[in-house]
Amino acid sequence: MRIRVTGLSQGTHQQFQQEPAASLGFNEQKFHFTEPVCVHFTLQKVGDQIVCRARVNTSMETECSRCLEPAEVKISEEMTLLLVFSRMSARDVTGAELKIIPQDAEEVDVTEEIRQAILLAIPPKPLCRADCLGLCPQCGTNLNLSNCRCQVKVEDARWPGLHKLLSNKSKGE
Ligand SMILES: [Zn+2]
Ligand SMILES: [Zn+2]
């Protein structure tokens, strides 16, 4: 994914890019995107610098971490990148959010930055819905769809542990 910087006048500019996730280097076997990656760029050129704000929107399907049913993950992530036109090489500058670009650059490739922003936005434990009840740990019933008889036993199993905790506490006093 590239943004055009050639001939950009001082001030604020909007750009829009849309690409399939595969062209951003996502493994299609591992990530199931249901929408292309859409990025609204707001470029603010001041002198030899461009403040690049990117709003990244996309959507993917994954597995709910509780009930293992398909879960939709909507991604809407914002990132800021500072582009600096310079003769310096990028190796002279440290800092991930700064990108040194040649003074005669026509376009800037931001594929890796956008890819990283999406990766960071993917929740480590996605849920099909916020109050997903998950699977019964004993019989595997999807508790969103039906109840099972083990549920009572699971509740009961908490009590011996609680009694033990309380008796240990009273011994300590
Ligand atoms: Zn679920
Ligand atoms: Zn059960």
Image (spheres, rainbow, N blue to C red):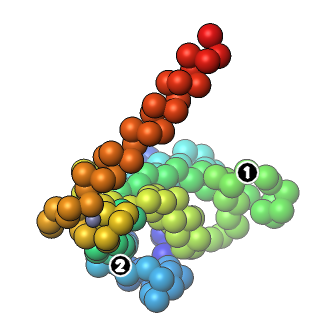
Horizontal side of 148 relative to 36 (left or right) equals left
- At a point 64% along the width and 52% down the height, the residue shown is 97
Q: Secondary structure at mark 1?
A: loop
Residue 153 % position (x, y):
30, 53
Mark 2: is the Cβ under 8 angstroms from ligand 1?
Answer: no
- At a point 16% along the width and 62% down the height, the residue shown is 147
- At a point 61% along the width and 18% down the height, the residue shown is 171
For this orientation, the residue located farthest to the right is 92
Residue 145 % position (x, y):
15, 67
At label 1, the amino acid type is Gly
Q: Quadrant of the C terminus?
A: top right
Mark 2 or 1: in front is: 2
Task: Tell which of 115 and 4 is nearer to you.
Answer: 115
Residue 67 % position (x, y):
31, 67
Question: Which residue matches tag 1?
Answer: 95
Mark 1: is the Cβ under 8 angstroms from ligand 1?
Answer: no
Question: Which residue matches tag 2?
Answer: 33
CA distance separating discs 2 and 1: 30 Å
* Residue 50 in view in this figure: no
* Residue 66 in view in this figure: yes
In the rendered image of this protein, does residue 56 appear above or below residue 157?
below
Horizontal side of 141 relative to 105 (left or right) equals left
In the rendered image of this protein, does residue 78 appear above or below residue 2?
above
For this orientation, the residue located farthest to the left is 146
| The quadrant where residue 134 appears | bottom left
| The quadrant where residue 127 appears | bottom left
At label 2, the amino acid type is Phe
